Image: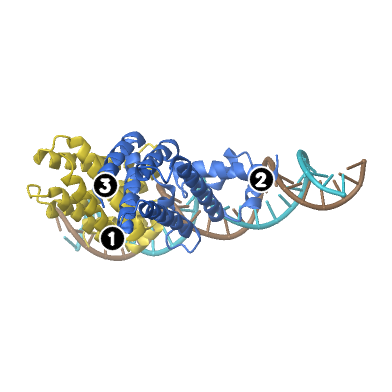
Chain colours: A yellow, B blue, C cyan, D brown
Amino acid sequence: MSRSKKKDTLLEVAEQLFYEHGFRGVGLKQIISEANVATMTLYNHFSSKDNLVEEVLKQREERYWSYLDSHVEMDSDSPFILAVEAHGRWLKEQSYKGDMFLRAIEDYAGTDNEIENIARGHKAKLLTYFQLLAQRKGKDNELNLANQFTLLLEGTTSMTTLIGAEKATEYSIAMARTIVQHTS
Amino acid sequence: MSRSKKKDTLLEVAEQLFYEHGFRGVGLKQIISEANVATMTLYNHFSSKDNLVEEVLKQREERYWSYLDSHVEMDSDSPFILAVEAHGRWLKEQSYKGDMFLRAIEDYAGTDNEIENIARGHKAKLLTYFQLLAQRKGKDNELNLANQFTLLLEGTTSMTTLIGAEKATEYSIAMARTIVQHTS
DNA sequence: AATTATATAGAACGACCTTTCTATTTTATC
DNA sequence: GATAAAATAGAAAGGTCGTTCTATATAATT
């Protein structure tokens, strides 16, 4: 088993466990146990638990954007609806229980490390993404529309915890249609 | 200092600390220290940390609903907008950093205690509240509208963590207006 | 085959966690 | 003022935490 395979296994296992039980709810012992790896193998690849959290977040962000990019044709008739639908599918497959980035912001705010910055960076990128979409469609109030759609996606994620991704997405698509139709 | 004053102090301090740093991020030592209370005083009033969390959630739910009730005249012209505005003020004053109930659901899901139930109960009540509002206004698709507004409030709470309560509320009110106007 | 880099199991560290205990002091009731 | 109840400080128990260390084994490179 090559060096990077072990690292990848650790990242996968850690992401899953952190997502399921929270960063503070999972110990390194559990991670190395489920990854079938020795303690020092983890510390060989990651300088600390915080560093592991950082890399997990970076990996998850990459997966999210590659997921969105592969489902949204930005020059289609209704890229906004496509984005909301893609986000809904992501929720159903990967994010049935809250948002890992928001959670990282809450857990690590004011603790003097890079984690909060990475998580906030992801959210800033989401806003930028919708601004770009609004721009391409020639909407005049880009920032306004972008913020409304970011709010919509965040709401969908929260609702998924409460009523499941399927229904949450159904309602958010309905709302997205209303907004697109009635916003210049 | 009477018996109930100490208990109230503990509840206040615990709510503040749990909200700021998360349930798992705060130890009992810190709570009793900031409440100026002995260890056994806490255990005299609460059977365990989990029990303290439960009572904190119950207290916070009461405060939320008395806040909403005092700001929303249910028979007004636009009770939906009033509710969104009231929720926004609540966020600004009490909930600038995520939602304590959602966090409780995530942190304690599948851990065999009452905490998750209390938190989910609060969210169920929110949905019921909006169904009642829709009913009074004679909207035909109550459940649909109620879910959309619940999603809107959840989104506003999340966005507050990212851009602050003021701006988050501004966008959610704009969306609420659009939805009310264009939904039967 | 020899050498170098990685991975291994498992113990040990000090810190912190929740909960319990003890013994003393404060407060309330009669 | 005597008696009972509640709150106190502080230690201790029994865990788990993140991190480091040691000493052995496996794999990769030369």
> Residue D17's x, y, as percent?
44, 52
Type of amino acid under label 2: Ser
Q: Nearer the viewer, mark 3 or mark 1?
A: 3
Pointer 1 residue? A167
Residue B179 is marked as 3
Which residue, given by chain and number where applicable, does mark 2 sit on? B4
User: Foreground: A135 or A55?
Assistant: A135
Can you say whether B144 is above or below B153 in the image? below
Residue A127, image x, y percentages: 22, 40
- The amino acid pointed to by label 1 is Lys
SS at circle 2: helix
Please tell me in which quadrant of the rendered image residue A165 appears: bottom left
The answer to whether tags 1 and 2 share a subunit is no
Q: Residue at x 36, y 36 (%)?
A: B165
Cα distance, mark 1 to mark 2?
44 Å
Callout 3: residue from which chain? B
Whether discs 3 and 1 lie on one chain: the answer is no
Whether residue B127 is visible to the viewer of this picture, yes or no, is yes
- Residue at 50% over, 41% down: B16
Q: Amino acid at mark 3?
A: Ile
